[in-house]
Amino acid sequence: MMMEARLGSRLFEKGKRPLRPTELCLSLAQQGRIISEAAQNAEIAADLYNRGKSGTARLAGTPIFMDGVIASMIASFQTTFPEVAIHQSYGYLADLCEQLNVGNIDVAICPVRRDSVPQGLKFKPILTGRNVIACAPSHPLARKTSLKLTEIANFPWIAPPAESPLYEDLLLALRSIGIKDFKVSFTGGSLASLISILGGSDALTVLPYSVVFMQSHNKALVSLPIKIEHPDRELGLLWRGDRHPRPAVKRFSEYIETEFSELGQNINLRGRDAVWRA
């Protein structure tokens, strides 16, 4: 046999019927099985990668949205696609744009005005900007179905960091309901610290309704039935337009879009009657 000539050794014992493999033949067969299995695994790995079911996605976003809304979506995404590694960080618009431009992240999730999308970046809105006045369920105003502005004027406020777009929203919201002088009892902090402080005080704050809505399962936040002016920004996905996204990044982005489409519908149903009615 040509193979035996090439190897210089027999693959089957001479004169045996039926054919009986030699020790070398058995060893080569074992290596063949390993090679075949490796080839199949490589084909599976390539297929998973190309379909966005494995790989990495690097994302960043504004802290309140990331902790209050996106985190649970990441968890459900990885339940479905456990082979995709998510690397998440925080930042506000200017920093996020810089991270996109230098290639440190693949996609940012942040509120942006459509007419202010930085050059070279693409933006896809996923949720209309809607804010509410929020507090803890234990707050004296939380059980009221209607409120007068005079009832909220004397309560202290929690303000987000000055570089956060929510800080501008807080000022806009209070101006829109006629409150010019207000007491700030706490500034900055994460969503977790904000919730803790609200829970232990009578303070109020302004938050995106999506964050309050997503926290309703643990009864950490409630929104007051006061119509305030909404920001002219939309939450959306931001990415470099000249870079083709890896399959895992594309799949994650599509997943987030789908999740926000459903979230937006639920928000409209509940908030239309309970929060921002005229």
Image: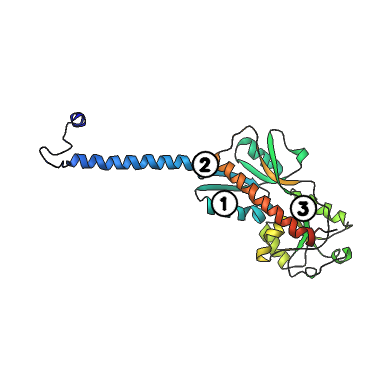
Q: CA distance from mark 1 to mark 2?
A: 15 Å
Q: CA distance from mark 1 to mark 3?
A: 25 Å
Q: Inspect this view and state whether residue 254 appears.
A: yes
- Please give the name of the residue rendered at 66% of the width and 38% of the height, measured from the top-left corner: 98
- Please give the name of the residue rendered at 87% of the width and 54% of the height, measured from the top-left corner: 176
The x and y percentages for residue 214 are 67, 59
Q: In the rendered structure, which amino acid carries the disc numbered 3?
A: Arg
Q: Quarter holding the N terminus? A: top left
Circle 1 is placed at which residue position?
A: 77
Task: Label 2, secondary structure: give it.
Answer: loop
Q: Nearer the viewer, residue 20 or 202?
A: 20
Query: Are circles 1 and 2 on residues that touch, CB within 8 Å?
Result: no
- Please give the name of the residue rendered at 68% of the width and 61% of the height, measured from the top-left corner: 215
Circle 3 is placed at which residue position?
A: 130
The x and y percentages for residue 110 are 69, 46
Identify the mark nearer the N-term, 1 or 3: 1
Determine the image quadrant of residue 269: bottom right
Query: Are circles 2 and 3 on residues that touch, CB within 8 Å?
Result: no
Q: CA distance from mark 2 to mark 3?
A: 35 Å
